Amino acid sequence: DQQVKQNSPSLSVQEGRISILNCDYTNSMFDYFLWYKKYPAEGPTFLISISSIKDKNEDGRFTVFLNKSAKHLSLHIVPSQPGDSAVYFCAAPPSNTGKLIFGQGTTLQVKP
Amino acid sequence: NAGVMQNPRHLVRRRGQEARLRCSPMKGHSHVYWYRQLPEEGLKFMVYLQKENIIDESGMPKERFSAEFPKEGPSILRIQQVVRGDSAAYFCASSPLAVSENTEAFFGQGTRLTVV
């Protein structure tokens, strides 16, 4: 039972353009959502989060949008930079468990 | 403040051998989580420990896998009698409190286990 899904395994974008990474979930009880970024041979690093009571959170070039009715969230990166090339995971926590459920990840390639 | 330290970074084991993966959490962090990433997949939760206690092991395979986080020393993920299907990247994360909207988990660089 995959509660958090990223249906696009890869995305290629030109430098300077917008990158949009998508994530769908099935559990309406998630209190918040996170995006992690992962470079090869490294561990995931936290990027940005959004509370389930909000529909948008912005941090610099990164904005996460949450559509609760559609059970969908998206990460927007604008403008995209070559250094943004990495695997992006969305994640969510089953309530009060301390653990995270991760999506399968989307590999973003930003071309110079 | 050093980050989460995992060792070894790479581990090769023959089928049937034991694998021991170590994780030293960040200073001041008493909560440790282990995740496994199989090729082309996302991270899957395995176990959550808080000093000497297993809080949640719902993601651990029932056999051959065990984890501990002793009062002194690193957390250990132990895999007995490894099989090829155990080949994966194993990530450890730590946090000062249970992960929540206000408490972030910090990940180590992972141990890549290859079973030959």
Image (spheres, coloured by chain):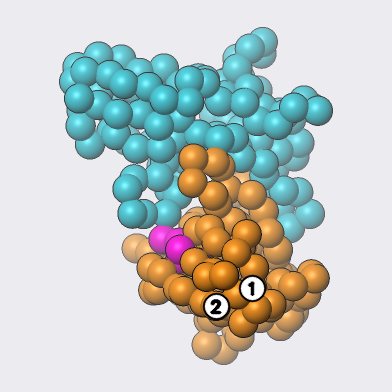
Chain colours: A orange, B cyan
Residue A92 visible, this orientation? no
Q: Quadrant of the C terminus of chain A?
A: bottom right
Percent coordinates x, y for residue B71 in the rendering: 66, 13
Q: Do marks 1 and 2 share a subunit?
A: yes
Q: Give the class, few, some or many, for how many residues have Cα within 10 Å of label 1's Cα (few <14, many ≥20).
A: many
Q: Is residue B49 left or right of residue B17?
A: right
Along the line of sight, the residue nearer the viewer: A28 or B2: B2
SS state under label 2? strand
Determine whether label 1 and label 2 are within 8 Å by CB.
yes
Q: Secondary structure at mark 1?
A: loop
Q: Quadrant of the N terminus of chain A?
A: bottom left
Residue A3 located left or right of residue A19: left
x, y percentage for residue A40?
49, 46
Relative to B43, is A102 above or below?
below
- The picture places residue B10, in percent across and down from the top left corner, at 42, 25
Residue occupying the point 75% across, 27% down: B2
- The residue range painted magenta reads A104-108
Disc 1 to disc 2, C-alpha distance: 7 Å
Q: Choose between B40 and B63: the one closer to the eye.
A: B40
The residue at which mark 1 appears reads as A80
The quadrant holding residue A16 is bottom right
The answer to whether B39 is drawn above or below residue B76 in the figure is below
The tag earlier along the polypeptide, 1 or 2, is 2
